[in-house]
Every structure is written in structure tokens, then in C-alpha cells.
Image (spheres, grey):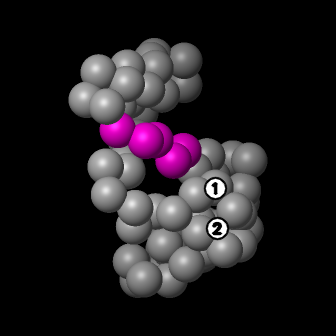
Amino acid sequence: MIRGARQVGKSTLVRIFARKQGLKLIEVNLERHPDLITEFQSMDVKRVIREIDFGLGLGNALERNTL
């Protein structure tokens, strides 16, 4: 998780890193998906991954080379 002030390049930095490392990137923006806040607050990795995979359909979070 990366936190910081708005509009300072956090997302861009991660996108560039993933691209240069040849990684598939799954982005979860809690401003766009506020219903996931409780999932992340639970600190239950399996629960979070399940929501990313099935609830949002953003991709397979457990797939190899996925960030």
C-alpha cells in the first residue's frame, strides 16, 4: 500500500515500476471502490484477494508476476 498526498506521482511510480519489471499490475483505488475499505481494514489477505479476484473482476491477484 502506498499512501501520500494527492497528485504527487504515487500511481505513476508504481505503473512505471511494474512495466519495467515486466509485472502485471492490479490497481485498487479505494476512492473508486469505497466498499473495499472494510476488506482492507480487516488485514485478512485472503479476504482482500478474494474481493479483488471475484468482487471486482480486476484479475487474478495470485497469478505469478502480478503486483
- Is residue 41 shown above or below 18? below
Q: Quadrant of residue 50?
A: bottom right
Q: Quick check: can you spot residue 22?
A: yes
Whether label 1 touches label 2, CB < 8 Å: no
Front in this rendered view, residue 1 or 61? 61
> Label 1 amino acid?
Leu
Q: Which residues are magenta?
A: 23-27
User: Gap between marks 1 and 2, in whole Å?
Assistant: 13 Å
| Residue 9: percent from left, percent from top | 44, 17
Q: Residues within 10 Å of mark 1 (few under 14, many from 20)?
A: some
Residue, x 71% and y 63% (percent of image)?
A: 56
| Residue 6: percent from left, percent from top | 54, 25
- Is residue 54 shown above or below 2? below
Query: Left or right: where does residue 59 sit relative to residue 66?
Result: right
Q: Quadrant of residue 33?
A: bottom right
Q: Is residue 25 magenta?
A: yes
Query: Left or right: where does residue 17 sit relative to residue 43?
Result: left
Query: Left or right: where does residue 16 sit relative to residue 53?
Result: left
> Label 2 amino acid?
Leu
Q: Is residue 22 magenta?
A: no
Q: Secondary structure at mark 1?
A: loop
Instruction: List the residue tagged with mark 1.
Output: 58
Instruction: List the residue tagged with mark 2.
Output: 36
Residue, x 46% and y 20% (percent of image)?
A: 12
